[in-house]
Amino acid sequence: MSTADLPSPNLAELSFEQALEQLERIVSELESGQAPLERSIDIYARGAELKAHCEAKLQAARLRVEKIVVGAGGDALRVDLAEFS
């Protein structure tokens, strides 16, 4: 896998799932120890970008869920998800 093998190099275009899939492939390749040093550095850098992208997507989703949670009676309730972390 090269950085050219990774679809959508523009992070803004990647869904959380796409970014996570790429990140998992990078981790597997790095853990295998088979990549040359320069390639390892390049894909490590891409992995760091993907990790940040995934964290931002998760934070945005968390904030959306925090804003509105529908209760059993259909009433909108504000819930602080930090209580469940």
Image: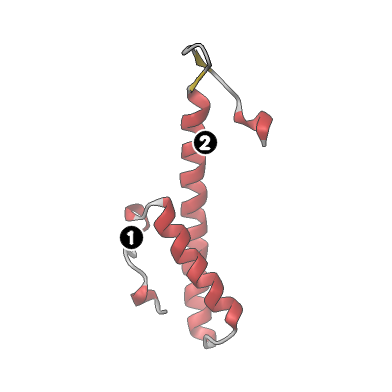
Contact between labelled residues 1 and 2, with CB atoms less than 8 Å apart: no
Tag 2's secondary structure?
A: helix
Which of the two residues, 48 or 5, is positioned nearer the viewer here? 5
Picture quarter with the N terminus = bottom left
Question: Which quadrant of the structure image shows residue 80?
Answer: top right
- 33 w.r.t. 44: above or below: below
The residue wearing badge 1 is 10
The residue wearing badge 2 is 62
Residue at image point 50% right, 32% down: 63
Residue at image point 50% right, 11% down: 73
- 42 w.r.t. 24: above or below: below
Question: Which quadrant of the structure image shows residue 21?
Answer: bottom left
Q: Where residue 51 appears, x then y in whole percent?
A: 52, 58
Q: Where residue 13 appears, x then y in whole percent?
A: 32, 54
Colour pattern: secondary structure
Q: Nearer the viewer, mark 2 or mark 1?
A: 2
Sequence-wise first label, 2 or 1 = 1
Q: Where residue 70 appears, x then y in whole percent?
A: 49, 19
- 15 w.r.t. 79: above or below: below
Residue at image point 33% right, 67% down: 7
Picture quarter with the C terminus = top right
